């Protein structure tokens, strides 16, 4: 049972768990939040967690562990080599995916480093349905290029299409012919397109794409970091999948790929990562990179306690009652905002609710980072920390000009089993207030701009005194102490 029916009212998502450990939150007054935002260089990554009321930056490594996950940590085997913990994790992944060979790594971007280091050469091409920031950075740092070939409908902010992460098969075949198969390092499919609203990809589209790759002898790679949400959408939205179990669907998906990698910070509710390699010879050609960059082959930079928790978390990911809460909470948040006329990405996808900043603050030019400005405004007016997913998250072109993002989004992530519905209602209320006062929001400009992954550590400043004006309007409505 993944959805509880109601008798006397309209249904709302119901948590299929009870809360046993809590962490105190605090809501700083708006004036203090303004100062914290200035100290952070108008970059929500630079805020201290103690200064945040609702941390919706990401679901990476901040999902709540279950009682069974925490208790499993006590049996961890901390041997440097040959840890029994590793073999338990490897065997569980083989049981679920059907792939026996596991290369452990400390998180998803470490997996991307290993894969890119092994297969990307200067001027080679990697085809993706859509890039993720670190996945693309690892390709480009080695001189490779990324071709993003998501179907055009995936970039439409509002629609009712169930699988907006699908790759354009015709464009893929044309790209292969233009590049030649020999110059394609691999085709990477992201199950849950992070940067365009967590939109899922269908099993049918994955099968067609991997069949095309096999036709031309091209390696296929699945980024399974957001697989749990994608599994939910395949089971509930895709024709012919409703009667299949999550385990059956997972095995069907993994059977399509040569390599499956994941961030355990998302997939499995823990902190770690891994690369599953189907072909043993290919596996052995990659394994020397693990001790070089990560750690020994039976821990790969992970804590063995986290590995034990992940092993239980993989099983929990196969439970519809457990993985349904995230998509249901996200869908509720998206639908409520949409009813209020607030521009959001529809339908609700995985990972979080996504606000279309291009439409929300359409008076801010793209070169002044509208999504970055909006994410700052939400912290100022509610203590909510979201994440910019737009031009600020891109890297500049070789000539120094901006590479404008296809979409300017603010992501309000909903970590699994962390927030209550009343907290989601608070977020909806504050987003509505900001929307009604959106004309007060202005742009941002860099004062410290790292060359790579600038959105993590860069510092910005407002192009005018708009933050002060916004805070004054907020205090007029909510008082001095909120």
Image (tube, grey):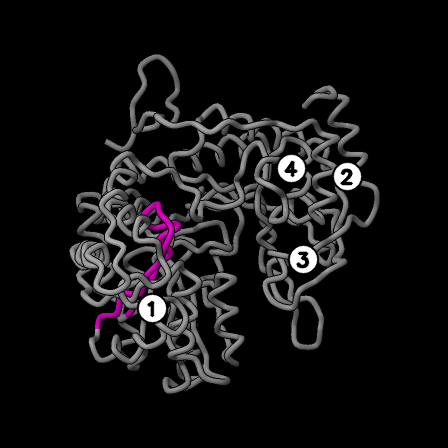
**Helix, strand or loop under label 2:** helix
Mark 4: give few (<14), some (14-19) or many (20+) Cα within 10 Å: many
Query: In the rendered structure, are the residues bearing label 3 and label 2 in contact, judged by CB atoms less than 8 Å apart?
Result: no
Query: In the rendered structure, are the residues bearing label 2 and label 1 in contact, judged by CB atoms less than 8 Å apart?
Result: no
Magenta span: 259-278
Mark 3: give few (<14), some (14-19) or many (20+) Cα within 10 Å: many
Residue 221 circle label: 1
Q: Give me the residue at 60% from left, 58% from top.
A: 393
Mark closest to the chain's N terminus, 3 or 2? 3
Front label number (4 vs 3): 3
User: Relative to residue 150, is residue 348 depicted above or below?
Assistant: above
Mark closest to the chain's N terminus, 4 or 3? 4
Q: CA distance from mark 3 to mark 2?
A: 19 Å
Q: Position of residue 192 (x, y in %)?
A: 40, 53
Mark closest to the chain's N terminus, 2 or 4? 4
Q: Is residue 273 magenta?
A: yes
Front label number (1 vs 3): 3
Residue labelled with disc 4: 379
Q: Position of residue 379 (x, y in %)?
A: 64, 37
Q: Is residue 275 left or right of residue 441?
A: left
Q: Position of residue 33 (x, y in %)?
A: 70, 34
Residue labelled with disc 2: 467
Query: In the rendered structure, are the residues bearing label 2 and label 4 in contact, judged by CB atoms less than 8 Å apart?
Result: no
Q: CA distance from mark 1 to mark 3?
A: 31 Å
Task: Out of 250 and 456, give the one closest to the viewer.
Answer: 456
Q: CA distance from mark 4 to mark 3?
A: 18 Å
Residue 133 circle label: none
**Helix, strand or loop under label 4:** helix
Residue labelled with disc 3: 458
Mark closest to the chain's N terminus, 4 or 1? 1
Q: CA distance from mark 4 to mark 1?
A: 37 Å
Q: Is residue 183 magenta?
A: no
């Amino acid at each position: 049972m993944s959805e509880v029916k109601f008798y006397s009212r309209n249904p709302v998502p119901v948590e299929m768990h009870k809360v046993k450990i809590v962490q105190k939150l605090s809501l700083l007054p708006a004036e203090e939040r303004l100062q914290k935002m200035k100290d952070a260089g108008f970059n929500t990554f630079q805020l201290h967690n103690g200064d945040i009321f609702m941390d919706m930056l990401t679901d990476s490594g901040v999902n709540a562990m279950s009682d069974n996950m925490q208790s499993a940590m006590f049996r961890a085997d901390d041997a440097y080599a040959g840890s029994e913990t590793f073999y338990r994790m490897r065997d569980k992944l083989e049981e679920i995916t059907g792939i026996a060979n596991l290369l452990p790594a400390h998180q998803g971007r470490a997996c991307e480093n290993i894969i890119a280091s092994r297969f990307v050469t200067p001027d080679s091409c990697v085809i993706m349905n859509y890039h993720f920031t670190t996945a693309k950075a690892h390709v480009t740092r080695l001189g490779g290029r990324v071709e993003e070939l998501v179907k055009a409908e995936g970039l439409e902010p509002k629609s009712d299409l169930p699988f907006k992460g699908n790759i354009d098969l015709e464009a893929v075949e044309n790209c292969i012919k233009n590049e030649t198969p020999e110059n394609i390092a691999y085709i990477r499919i992201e199950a849950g397109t992070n940067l365009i609203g967590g939109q899922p990809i269908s099993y049918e589209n994955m099968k067609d794409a991997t069949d095309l790759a096999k036709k031309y002898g091209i390696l296929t790679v699945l980024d399974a970091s957001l697989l749990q949400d994608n599994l939910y959408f395949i089971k509930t939205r895709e024709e012919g999948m409703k009667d299949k179990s999550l385990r059956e669907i997972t095995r069907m998906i993994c059977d399509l790929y040569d390599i499956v990698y994941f961030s355990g910070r998302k997939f499995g509710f823990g902190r770690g990562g891994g690369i599953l390699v189907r072909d043993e010879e290919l596996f052995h050609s990659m394994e020397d990179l693990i001790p070089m960059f990560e750690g020994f082959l039976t821990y790969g930079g992970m804590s063995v306690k986290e590995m034990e928790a992940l092993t239980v978390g993989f099983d929990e990911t196969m439970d519809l009652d457990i993985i349904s809460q995230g998509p249901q909470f996200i869908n509720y948040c998206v639908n409520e905002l949409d009813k209020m006329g607030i521009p959001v990405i529809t339908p609700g996808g995985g990972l979080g609710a996504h606000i279309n900043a291009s439409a929300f603050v359409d008076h801010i030019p793209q070169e002044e980072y509208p999504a970055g400005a909006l994410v700052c405004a939400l912290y100022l007016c509610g203590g909510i920390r979201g994440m910019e997913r737009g031009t600020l998250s891109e890297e500049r072109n070789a000539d120094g000009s901006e590479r404008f993002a296809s979409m300017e989004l603010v992501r309000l992530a909903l970590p699994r089993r962390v927030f209550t519905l009343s907290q989601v209602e608070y977020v909806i209320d504050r987003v509505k207030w900001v929307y009604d006062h959106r004309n007060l929001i202005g742009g941002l400009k860099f004062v410290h701009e790292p060359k790579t992954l600038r959105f993590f550590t860069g510092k910005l400043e407002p192009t005018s005194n708009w933050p002060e004006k916004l805070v004054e309007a907020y205090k007029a409505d909510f008082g001095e102490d909120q």
